[in-house]
Amino acid sequence: WQGGMAIQGGVFLGVLTGVWYCQRHHLDTVHLMDVLAPAIILGQALGRCANLLNGDAFGAPTGSSFGIIYPSTTLAHLTYGDQPLWPAEVWEGQLDMVIFAILLLYRSFPHVKGQAFALYIMLYSTARFFLEYLRGDYTALVLGLFHSAQMTSVVAFTLAALAYLILPLWYRKKAAKH
């Protein structure tokens, strides 16, 4: 059995746990999500460094001399041998750092509560969707079209984009009532 927990599921369960904790302790859930979004993506970037060191979350064969050749003790090497693989986890870690910087910069622009977290979800989902084309650690397709992480990314992006657009209207409507 080869398995593990995908980061998308970890973030989802982490958010659910965070919402439960905030509700239980009467904390502002949406504000906390906005504050923690940069820390979450920074943690994801560090996690991709661990993926590189462990030889998991690896890319597919490049078909050329470019790429990473993993040590023989890693799952990447057991799967593809001495073939050079796309450095998908390295590129994802780099994109995660770009998202981290964007989220930090976003704080200085006017926005309503919840939009920073929605932006994090949109940016990460976009990056993950396209990077999945380079991944080689699993090849199963959903509906014959996409990897499961790509499908999750589409759903997450759509929900986050809706939240990003609706939240300002909702807060404006809420303020007008008071």
Image (cartoon, rainbow, N blue to C red):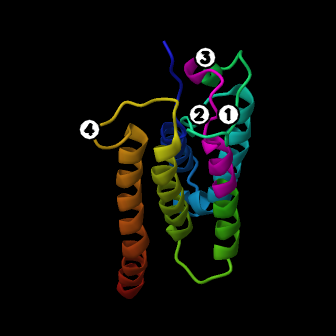
| The C terminus: image quadrant | bottom left
User: Could you tell whether 162 is left or right of 100 in the image?
Assistant: left
Q: Earlier in the sequence, mark 2 or mark 3?
A: 2
Q: Which residue is mark 3?
A: 78
The reply to whether dot 1 and dot 4 touch (C-beta < 8 Å) is: no
Please tell me whether residue 90 is drawn above or below residue 97 in the rendered image.
Answer: above
Q: Circle 3: is it few (<14), some (14-19), or many (20+) Cα within 10 Å?
A: few
Disc 2/disc 3 C-alpha distance (Å): 13 Å
Q: Amino acid at mark 1?
A: Asn
Q: Which residue is mark 2?
A: 57
The reply to whether dot 2 and dot 1 touch (C-beta < 8 Å) is: yes
Disc 2/disc 1 C-alpha distance (Å): 6 Å
Of 172 and 147, which appears nearest the observer?
Answer: 147
The stretch in magenta equals 78-95
Of 42 and 80, which appears nearest the observer?
Answer: 80
Q: Earlier in the sequence, mark 4 or mark 2?
A: 2
Q: Amino acid at mark 3?
A: Leu
Disc 1/disc 4 C-alpha distance (Å): 27 Å
Find out whether residue 80 is within the magenta segment.
Answer: yes
Residue appearing at x 68%, y 20% in the figure: 74
Q: Which residue is mark 1?
A: 51
Residue appearing at x 46%, y 29% in the figure: 138
Q: Is residue 79 visible?
A: yes
SS category of the residue bearing label 2: loop
The reply to whether dot 3 and dot 1 touch (C-beta < 8 Å) is: no
Q: Position of residue 95 (x, y in %)?
A: 64, 57
Q: Earlier in the sequence, mark 3 or mark 1?
A: 1
